[in-house]
Structure formats: structure tokens, C-alpha cells
Amino acid sequence: MNRSSYLYWVKFGRKHQENQTFFYCQIIQAYADSKGIYGAPKITYVLRSKSIFCSISRVSKAMALLGIRSIVNKSFPKKISRMTEKEKALIVNLIKDLKITHLNQIWTTDITYIQTLHEGTFYLISYIDYFSKKVIAWGLFNDQKADKLVLVLKKL
């Protein structure tokens, strides 16, 4: 190795290496704080909030070099509605034009998907009073069939 190359490395290269190491440590810390969920865009946001200026591509390359990836959730199951657009428009308009003045005049239902890591997908079925916006009945099930909707309604 040339003496001038060594002196150049001592003057400039060592500082760059220390900065790189610090940068990698900050990425690992942000990744660990998010329990492995954050990807390059969110880690970049966290680093910028700590006044560490970097780009998404730089963080992405560093994550690939460190061998870490974000945990990507599966998308919700896609369901195809059997109703036509005209039928959907009629239902929305029926509720929209009504004057709601007291409790128990109109109830609406909501089905929420809850994805878990080990048990799979659960469905939270709830009935909501449209006037008060409060849940009046609910149930948690493994599937979202019509008999489950009726079962929650019978709890009332």
C-alpha cells in the first residue's frame, strides 16, 4: 500500500467508515424499535426526524446489505358483490333521504376483518344505531356467513 493512500484513508476514509457504521446502527435501531415492521420509507422518515439526512434508496440499499426486510401484511380477502350498481345506489339513497330523529329508527351493520398471525382471520360483526352511532350488538366469528349476522341480531 502506498504511503499517500494510507494517509488519505486516515484523513478521510476512517471518518467515512465511522459515519457508515453509525448510519447502519441507526437503521438497525429504527428497525428494532418498530419490531421489524418498518420498511425503507418509514425508516427514512424516522432517521430524518433524528436529523440524519438520507434518501429512501440509500436506506433501502443499506437494509439489503444488512439483510433486513419489512414484514408485509397480507391483503384483505377480496369479495365480489352480487349487487348491481343500480341496486347499490338505491340502498344508499334510501338511507340518505330519511330523517333520523330518535334511537332505534335505523340500524346498520359493519363487518371488520381482524388478521392475526397464528389463528388466521376473524370477523367482527356489529350492529350500530344510526342515530347515536353506538354499537348495540356484536359478535366475533371465524367466517362471515348470513347465519352469523342473524345470530348477533338474536343477542338483542
Image (tube, grey):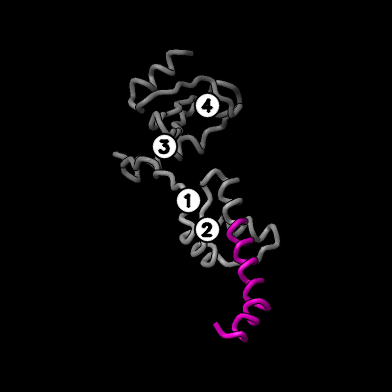
Q: CA distance from mark 3 to mark 2?
A: 43 Å
Task: Report which residue position mark 2 lands on.
Answer: 40
- Residue 30 sits above or below residue 10 on the image: above
Judge by depth and name the residue closer to the eye, 77 or 53: 53
Q: Which mark is residue 128?
A: 4
Tell me the kind of residue under disc 1: Ser
Task: Report which residue position mark 3 lands on.
Answer: 91
- Look at discs 3 and 4 and give the one toward the viewer: 4
- Residue 40 at what x, y percent from top left? 52, 58
- Of the numbered discs 3 and 4, the one sitting upstream in the chain is 3
Judge by depth and name the residue closer to the eye, 67 or 9: 9
Q: Secondary structure at mark 3?
A: helix
Q: Is residue 26 magenta?
A: no
Badge 3 crowding class, 10 Å Cα cut-off, few under 14, some 14 to 19, many 20 or more, is few
- Look at discs 3 and 1 and give the one toward the viewer: 1
Q: CA distance from mark 3 to mark 4?
A: 17 Å
Task: Report which residue position mark 1 lands on.
Answer: 70
Q: Are marks 3 and 2 in contact (CB under 8 Å)?
A: no
- Residue 46 sits above or below residue 149 on the image: below
Q: Are marks 4 and 2 in contact (CB under 8 Å)?
A: no
Report the magenta residues as a range. Answer: 1-25
- Of the numbered discs 3 and 1, the one sitting upstream in the chain is 1
Quarter of the image for the N terminus: give it: bottom right
Q: CA distance from mark 3 to mark 1?
A: 41 Å
- Residue 108 at what x, y percent from top left? 48, 29
Q: Which residue is at 59% across, 22% downward?
A: 103
Badge 2 crowding class, 10 Å Cα cut-off, few under 14, some 14 to 19, many 20 or more, is many
Give the prevailing secondary structure in the magenta stretch: helix
Q: Are marks 4 and 1 in contact (CB under 8 Å)?
A: no
Q: Secondary structure at mark 2?
A: helix
Tell me the kind of residue under disc 2: Ala
Q: CA distance from mark 2 to mark 1?
A: 8 Å
